[in-house]
Image (cartoon, helix red, strand yellow):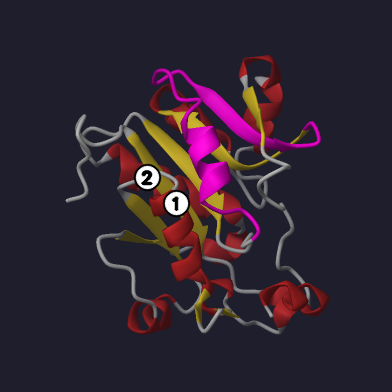
């Protein structure tokens, strides 16, 4: 659909947008208003403008409402039935969806509640892709953060270890020397929207 001159990129965007916003009074993060639209739309746009033609979006809390209210053309919408158990189940669901899609050699993973991370950071991390064995991550002053790029060779191992709220943290920790860190502190801010106080970032 969005093929470029060299054929479609092997790097797909994977947006984790299942969170229920427990510390936000139970407001699903995907639907938080940002610049007049649901936050999930902003995150998808950042992935697309950063070079990920294909985007898989993992939904959980209020999934039906997100489908009804958010405009996400061309995205593959993935349900995470166990989303309330933490990010791990959403990551597993997303990687399974990507594994079933032909021609995908890497996943560039973003979280829906980090609107300070935009297309520039996505493009930088995406550019670190070399092969299905690539592991890369944005860094902020030397601290690893999102987005993260997982080559397909790592998907099964990450899925095995992704439990609770850990996501891929343990897997990456054990392979720290293999991760290409891409400094993004000059083009992005890695704050999360977790509490009522954080909502000021969306104003």
Tell me what residue is drawn at x 56 percent, y 54 percent: 118
Q: Are marks 1 and 2 in contact (CB under 8 Å)?
A: yes
Apparent side of residue 128 relative to residue 166 in the rendered image (left or right): left
Q: Which residue is mark 2?
A: 52
Where's residue 67, x and y in %? Answer: 35, 77
Residue 5: name its quadrant. Answer: top left
Residue 184 is a magenta residue: no
Residue 131 is a magenta residue: yes
Q: Quadrant of the C terminus?
A: bottom right
Disc assigned to residue 47 = 1
Where's residue 158, x and y in %? Answer: 52, 33
Residue 158 in the image: above or below residue 3 = above
Tell me what residue is drawn at x 40 percent, y 59 percent: 57
Apparent side of residue 179 relative to residue 200 in the rendered image (left or right): left
Q: Is residue 84 visible?
A: yes
In the foreground, 195 or 180: 180
In the foreground, 133 or 83: 133
Tell me the element at label 2.
Answer: loop
Residue 177 in the image: above or below residue 79 = above
Tell me what residue is drawn at x 69 percent, y 15 percent: 177
Farthest top residue? Answer: 177
Where's residue 92, x and y in %? Answer: 46, 46
Tell me the element at label 1.
Answer: helix
In the foreground, 157 or 152: 152
Disc assigned to residue 120 = none
Q: Is residue 93 visible?
A: no
Crowding near the residue tagged with mark 2, few <14, some 14–19, many ≥20 C-alpha atoms within 10 Å: many
Label 1 and label 2: CA atoms lie apart by 5 Å
Where's residue 130, x and y in %? Answer: 43, 18
Residue 56 in the image: above or below residue 26 = above
Q: Which residues are magenta?
A: 116-142
Tell me what residue is drawn at x 47 percent, y 34 percent: 126
């Amino acid at each position: 659909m969005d093929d470029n001159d060299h054929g479609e990129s092997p790097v797909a965007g994977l947006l984790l947008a299942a969170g229920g916003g427990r510390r936000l009074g139970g407001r699903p993060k995907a639907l938080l208003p940002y610049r007049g639209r649901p936050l999930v739309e902003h995150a998808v746009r950042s992935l697309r403008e950063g070079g990920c033609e294909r985007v898989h979006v993992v939904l959980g809390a209020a999934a039906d409402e997100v489908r009804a209210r958010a405009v996400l053309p061309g995205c593959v919408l993935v349900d995470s039935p166990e989303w309330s158990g933490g990010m791990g189940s959403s990551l597993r669901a997303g990687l399974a969806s990507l594994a079933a899609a032909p021609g995908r050699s890497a996943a560039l993973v973003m979280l829906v509640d980090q609107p300070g991370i935009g297309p520039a950071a996505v493009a930088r991390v995406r550019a670190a892709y070399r092969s299905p064995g690539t592991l890369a991550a944005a860094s902020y002053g030397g601290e690893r953060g999102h987005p993260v790029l997982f080559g397909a060779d790592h998907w099964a191992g990450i899925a095995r270890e992704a439990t609770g709220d850990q996501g891929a943290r343990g897997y990456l920790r054990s392979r720290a020397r293999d991760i290409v860190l891409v400094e993004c502190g000059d083009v992005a801010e890695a704050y999360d929207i977790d509490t009522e106080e954080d909502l000021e970032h969306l104003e």
